[in-house]
Image (tube, rainbow, N blue to C red):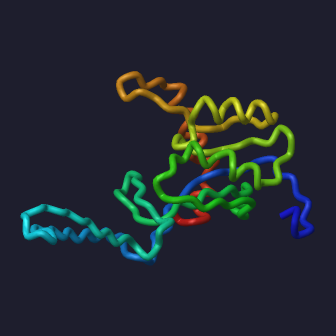
Amino acid sequence: MHDHGLDVEVKKVLVDCTFIESAARPKKKEEICIEAINEVGEQEQVVTVNKEYSNDPDALWGKNGSGFHFGFKSTFSTSKDGIILGVTLDPANVYDGHLFQPVLVKTPLAVGAEVYTDIGFASSENDKWLSEYGLINFISKKQKPKHKDADTITFNKLLSKARFPVERTFGS
């Protein structure tokens, strides 16, 4: 935004990921050729494997709660009103937590800005990064299924309500 003459500093930012399906078919075709006779007439076994991949070499397989997807993962940051502030595009197999910092670097954040996101971005590395840059951490907290804490459940529910604009932006 700064590159286009728009100087904006956001005090509340919402981050999420979505899959973008590749238009190319996810194919992997293998052709195996076996040759059994050499030049002298002796029997010799030579195996050659020819592989043909998708027309979209950058697309990869990724997985979420609804299944497997072949394509890309778009990570985006939005304002509290759903206006897109930053976007990155990566292969679908990249872990969400690794995509958090690159999209925030592209986002015009005020010091002390609140950053809201889901459990997919939760990591000690991202927590540390937010505190180093003076940003307020509102990443949903992970829990072990057998040790659910009432305070954490309430915290995550409140965050999910605050994160509604980012979910609405792409209808995911």
- Foreground residue, 95 or 13? 95
Q: Vertical placement of 85 versus 104: above or below?
A: below
The x and y percentages for residue 41 are: 8, 70
Residue shown at the point (53%, 65%) measured from the top left: 171
Location of residue 141 (image quadrant) = top right
The x and y percentages for residue 7 are: 91, 60
Location of residue 6 (image quadrant) = bottom right
Q: Residue furthest front?
A: 40
Q: Is residue 62 left or right of residue 97?
A: left
- Foreground residue, 4 or 169? 4
The x and y percentages for residue 145 are: 37, 29
The x and y percentages for residue 151 are: 54, 25
Q: Is residue 61 left or right of residue 9?
A: left
Q: Vertical placement of 170 versus 153: above or below?
A: below
Quarter placement of the N terminus? bottom right
- Foreground residue, 16 or 90? 90
Residue shown at the point (51%, 46%) measured from the top left: 95
Q: Vertical placement of 109 versus 127: above or below?
A: below
Q: Is residue 125 left or right of residue 157?
A: right
